């Protein structure tokens, strides 16, 4: 991901660069596919907890996962014009 901007560039340039990177990421698959993959990864992580032992930061992992799901839900809403 290349989001570097020069110090003299406007803050808008940074957001445009981020937008391009997000667009490139999302163009590789649909928001629904990303959501399904996230559920697969998180489910595997949760199942592995039995073997690895409980993670101290499990709540942080859950909330990061939740934020990613919400992001893809918002993206899907934007795509549908909602």
Image (cartoon, rainbow, N blue to C red):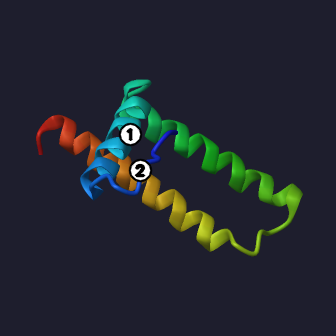
Q: Residue at x 36, y 52 (%)?
A: 71
Residue, disc 1: 22
Q: Position of residue 27 (x, y in %)?
A: 37, 26
Few, some or many residues within 10 Å of mark 2 (<14, 14–19, 20+): few
Q: Residue at x 29, y 58 (%)?
A: 11
Q: Looking at the image, is mark 2 or mark 1 nearer the viewer?
A: 2
Label 2: element kind: loop
Q: Position of residue 76 (x, y in %)?
A: 27, 40
Quadrant housing residue 31 = top left
5 shown above or below 25: below
29 shown above or below 10: above
Residue that protrudes farthest toward the left in the picture: 81
Residue, disc 2: 6
Whether tag 2 and tag 1 are in contact, CB under 8 A, the answer is no
Q: Residue at x 12, y 45 (%)?
A: 82
Few, some or many residues within 10 Å of mark 1 (<14, 14–19, 20+): few
Label 1: element kind: helix
Residue nearest the observer in this picture, 17 or 79: 17
Residue that protrudes farthest toward the top in the picture: 28
């Amino acid at each position: 991901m290349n989001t570097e901007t020069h110090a003299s560039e406007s803050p808008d340039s940074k957001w445009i660069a981020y937008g391009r990177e997000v667009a490139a990421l999302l163009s590789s698959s649909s928001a629904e596919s990303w959501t399904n993959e996230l559920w697969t990864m998180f489910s595997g992580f949760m199942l592995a907890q039995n073997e690895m032992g409980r993670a101290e930061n499990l709540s942080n992992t859950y909330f990061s996962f939740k934020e990613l799901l919400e992001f893809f839900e918002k993206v899907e809403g934007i795509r549908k014009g909602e």
